[in-house]
């Protein structure tokens, strides 16, 4: 096993794939943005669904004096 100071390993403590370049970093950024957008859409969809249910059930709740 080569030592960490070996020239082939690069900087000590930096364990990155030598084949990752600009495209790999763009891919990581794109995936992170896609994940954030997907989470925002899911939260919005849940909020809208809850609002519609409350709006639909409000007359029933008022009818029975539960609210």
Image (spheres, grey):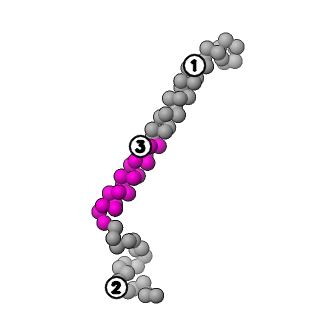
Span highlighted in magenta in the image: 21-39
Q: Residue furthest top?
A: 63
Q: In which quarter of the image is the C terminus?
A: top right
Q: How crowded is mark 3: few (under 14 residues within 10 Å), some or many (20 or more)?
A: few
- The residue pinned by badge 2 equals 7
Q: In this view, does 5 lie to the left or right of 67?
A: left
Q: How many marks?
A: 3
How many angstroms separate mark 1 from mark 3 (CA)? 28 Å
Question: Whole-percent x and y of residue 8?
Answer: 35, 83
Q: Which of the labelled discs sits on residue 45, or is there none?
A: none
Please tell me whether residue 10 is drawn above or below residue 26 in the rendered image. below
The reply to whether the magenta stretch includes residue 2 is: no
- Looking at this view, is 66 or 30 the one in front? 30
Per the picture, the main secondary structure of the magenta-coloured stretch is: helix
Q: For the residues marked 2 and 1, what is the alpha-carbon distance in whole angstroms?
A: 69 Å
Q: In this view, does 55 lie above or below 46?
A: above
**Location of mark 1 (residue):** 56
Tag 3, which secondary structure? Answer: helix
Q: Earlier in the sequence, mark 3 or mark 2?
A: 2
| Residue 37 numbered mark, or none | 3
Q: On screen, 66 above or below 24?
A: above
Q: In which quarter of the image is residue 14?
A: bottom left
- Please rate how many residues cluster around mark 2, counting C-alpha atoms within 10 Å: few if below 14, some from 14 to 19, many from 20: few
What residue lies at 49% left-to-right and 33% top-to-bottom?
45
User: In what element is the residue under mark 1?
Assistant: helix
Position of residue 63 measured from the top left corner of the image (x, y, whole percent): 67, 12
Work out whether mark 1 precedes mark 3 in sequence or the reverse, and give the earlier one: 3
Q: What is the CA distance from the residue labelled 3 to the residue labelled 2?
A: 42 Å
Q: Are marks 3 and 2 in contact (CB under 8 Å)?
A: no
């Amino acid at each position: 096993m080569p030592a960490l100071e070996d020239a082939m390993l690069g900087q000590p403590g930096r364990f990155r794939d030598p084949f990752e370049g600009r495209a790999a970093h763009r891919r990581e950024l794109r995936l992170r943005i896609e994940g954030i957008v997907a989470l925002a859409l899911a939260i919005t969809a849940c909020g809208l669904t809850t609002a519609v249910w409350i709006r639909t059930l409000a007359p029933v709740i008022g009818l029975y004096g539960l609210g």
